[in-house]
Image: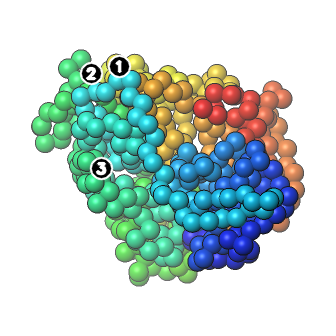
Amino acid sequence: MANSSSSPSGRDLTQGIALEDIAEDGMVAGHVGGDAVLLARKGGKCFAVAAACTHYGGPLADGLVVGDTIRCPWHHAAFCLRDGAVTRPPALDNLKCWRVEQIDGRVFVREAMPAAQPPTPHIAQAPESVVIVGGGAAGNAAAQTLRLEGYEGPITVWSADTALPYDRPNLSKDYLAGTASPAWLPLRLPAFYAEHHIDIQCDQRVTGLDPQRKEMTLSDGRRERYGALLIATGATPVRLGVPGANLPHVAVLRTLADCNALIARLGNARQCVVVGAGFIGLEAAAALRVRGIEVHVVMRGAHPMERVLGEALGQMLRTLHESHGVSFHVAEVTGIEPHRVRLSTGVDLAADVVLTGIGVQPEVALPQAAGLALDRGVVVNEYLQTSAPDIYAAGDIARWPDPRTGEPIRVEHWVVAERQGVVAARNILGQRRRFAAVPFFWTQHYDVAVNYVGHAEGWDRVDIDGDPAAHACTATYWRNNRRLAVATVGRDLESLRAELAFEEETPVARV
């Protein structure tokens, strides 16, 4: 998804606007000089902030004011209206703010304000060092939060990835499509980590862990001590177990290196077979069609993503992809040869490249060997603490108690991982923050996005409001007459309101 334009438009807010023209909890878009600015009203006070989200440039004017924050309609980042500070990922950078003055019933936006100051340090305990295993969404968010909260001790991130933390969701979308610059991908530049004294060790694997001694072993045999430890090792792709699955033209898409290797192979390719119709498979199919590659998707069920989104939205996505030239095959792959894929239906598909997207498995080898409690992931409590003292887990591996249902859940999505990284970092510092955020994810296909809030591993009813075929609808998932999740297409504000409603059912989620 390309960044939204934030070029100035609308009113010149330096000239003033009548207070009565701004509804309570409402917003007015305008500009100050060359900057697009949003003027928001809350509790009789007005605040002026930059009009575009710092994540992907989402238009905040289409968002939602909640308390003293504003939430982005695209990916649900949130910012404080008073000082522009990020209050929720996936945004990493604060919004620019301007001073606001009210005179005789009119509101004027004045000069830009200084950048938001870091919060007052709140460190109930300061471990001698913090080690983070995993350089993805959770690990990066945790390292940044530790410094933001005032922790001054050593922070080391051991990452098996060869690259510094990057925007993984973009790999199967714009970056694979060739419409995103490589410069978009890094979450932070190397200078940021140097300035904040965050030591990131890339292409390094932690192979052993001794919770009793607070010691870990690296793949080269070195041993390192830690004061507190966050395990955020993520997940690894499930591999096909058929003849030919290890041929050079059979790819997976998880890391930046995976994506770059796939892009290099696409240079001479005309036909690609995508195995699996989940998030990665379908997003990649859309990206490959942008490149002009002929795409065939092999899937088990009649509707893509049906297990997560249900039949109606699954059929919507299938129709959308078919309208862009993607062919679907309900079958199993029985074998792969250098230039073709054999299906259980007897059909052979020509293929210069085969991309498998049949799911991932949590990377739990390290915590398992260390004797930590496991249950289809690493078991953590509401504070993201594992069964061992001073060890936390976050991201794709963490299985935590859902405060809304009481059931343990594990969610493999970017925003959840980032938000868990933030909470884990605060709890490492003794703040005792419960993780109660409502899970959120988005998936993008061509110009159609699906936003999903809540969590429903199963349901007995799906209510559809609107028309999926027109890409304007809401799907609500119920079990035993309890609303578990809401998916929206073309209704970003409704997604934000659904998220807020879930939070209000669980007051701790607002913390």
- In the foreground, 307 or 31: 31
Q: Is residue 130 above or below residue 1?
A: above
Q: Are marks 3 and 1 in contact (CB under 8 Å)?
A: no
Q: Amino acid at mark 1?
A: Ala
Identify which residue is drawn at 38% across, 46% down.
Answer: 144
Q: Is residue 92 above or below residue 154?
A: below
Q: Amino acid at mark 2?
A: Pro
> Which quarter of the image is occupied by the N terminus?
bottom right
Describe the element under mark 2 as helix, strand or loop: loop
Q: Is residue 199 visible?
A: yes
Horizontally, residue 127 falls left or right of residue 111, namely left
- In the foreground, 136 or 272: 136
Q: CA distance from mark 2 to mark 1?
A: 7 Å
Question: Where is residue 220 shown, x and y percent of the image?
Answer: 13, 42
Q: Which mark is residue 211?
A: 2
Horizontally, residue 18 falls left or right of residue 253, namely right
Identify which residue is drawn at 77% across, 47% down.
Answer: 44
Q: Are marks 2 and 1 in contact (CB under 8 Å)?
A: yes
Describe the element under mark 3 as helix, strand or loop: loop
Display colour scheme:
rainbow
For marks 3 and 1, the one nearer the N-term is 3
Horizontally, residue 305 falls left or right of residue 214, namely right
Q: Is residue 131 above or below residue 446?
A: above
Identify which residue is drawn at 60% across, 49% down.
Answer: 82
Report which residue position mark 3 lands on.
196
Question: Where is residue 121 shown, x and y percent of the image?
Answer: 40, 34
Q: Is residue 244 visible?
A: no
For marks 2 and 1, the one nearer the N-term is 2
